[in-house]
Image (cartoon, rainbow, N blue to C red):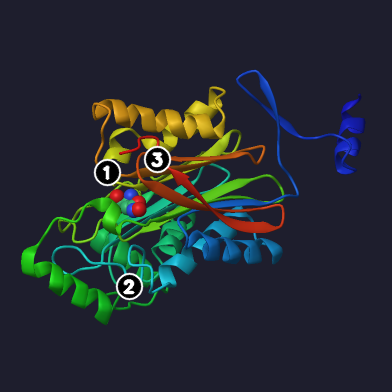
Amino acid sequence: MKRRDFFKASAIGLTIPSTIIKGQKINISKNNPVILSTWNFGLNANIEALKELKNGGNAMDAAEKGAMHAESDVENTSVGFGGLPDEKGKVTLDACVMDRSGNAGSVAFLQNIKHPVSVARKVMEETKHVMLVGEGANQFAIKNGFKEKKLLTKKSKNEWKKWLQNRREMTPHETHDTLSILVQDKKGDLAGACTTSGWAYKMHGRVGDSPIIGAGLFLDNEVGSAAATGLGEEVLKTTGSFLVVELMRQGRSPQEACEEALKRVIKRHNGNPDFQIGYIALRKDGEIGSACLKWSFEYALAKNGSNKLYKINGLIQS
Ligand code: SD4
């Protein structure tokens, strides 16, 4: 076929765009958006993301809108407004975004700003940098029109005060519920976001995996995307999301890639980790995968006109 004919054929939909992953031809999913996000509040995040896609937004717009929903949700005590504070009673937020061009933005240890995901996007779009933290991130947010807001609610303050009485270290899976969201839009492009208030009653200054590109979130628009939830320290030590995407690049399915990344963690912990990690992965052809270490994990998948919650069991049964 001549080059001109090829483009004509593409325009009328005769050719299916594809990408080669490890010698394997993968058809790129187009005109059929996929949204994959963590935990049960992912369902509402997916709805917001879908609305954004329907209104003409791209994958990045949709991922941001989905994450913003979780950040506003006061019932969600692990993300944004209403998130449980650190040991000093401060709500400190971590978030990051990545777009189809491999651009990335991130904020960590951000306080008093309701939508860290949007600040992360601004860092990506308005600065030469990838990551801003703490006071500097806060000043940047205010300069860019974000309003300061007290994020500690009456309820979360009371919970913290109760915790102060014995300062029992929370096991991360008791309070962790980060929102990670992966979107593929109708053009087939990928974007993702990750947002959290982190480990409840954490050490003041602690930052987890969620704002770290390659740990909490990673994508390569030619291959796929991945994101994490769970004990950030262990995701960081294995560069979890990057690993999942690289495994897909090497020909593993999204499911196999999530499982293999977790198997490395299991090995590091002599077969019996006592914490949780969950991964979600979305390949360029719209196929998804998800796995968790222990207990169970839920992800929300919006695809082919439905938006459903799926519960999976851990690779290790204890
Ligand atoms: C963190 N990974 O701060 C986050 C928390 C989380 O489900 O994912 N909770 O370590």
Residue that sits furthest to the left in the current view: 166
Q: Name the residue at 14% across, 74% down.
A: 161
Label 2 crowd bin: few (<14), some (14–19), many (20+), radius 10 Å? many
The foreground one among 123 and 57 is 57
Locate the N terminus and report the quarter of the image it occupies. top right
Location of residue 289 (image quadrant) = top right
The response on whether ligand 1 sits within 8 Å of label 3 is no
Return the residue at label 3.
314
The foreground one among 6 and 139 is 6
Q: Are marks 1 and 2 in contact (CB under 8 Å)?
A: no
Q: Residue 133, how many percent across, how many down?
A: 28, 56
Q: Residue 91, how many percent across, how many down?
A: 25, 67
- The numbered disc on residue 82 is 2
Return the residue at label 1.
275
The response on whether ligand 1 sits within 8 Å of label 2 is no
The response on whether ligand 1 sits within 8 Å of label 1 is no
Q: Report the amino acid beneath label 1.
A: Phe
Earlier in the chain: of badge 2 and badge 3, it is 2
Earlier in the chain: of badge 1 and badge 2, it is 2
Location of residue 109 (image quadrant) = bottom left
Q: CA distance from mark 1 to mark 2?
A: 24 Å
Label 1 crowd bin: few (<14), some (14–19), many (20+), radius 10 Å? some
Residue that sits furthest to the bottom in the current view: 154
Q: Name the residue at 49% across, 68% down.
A: 69
Q: Name the residue at 62% across, 58% down.
A: 307
Residue that sits furthest to the front in the current view: 318
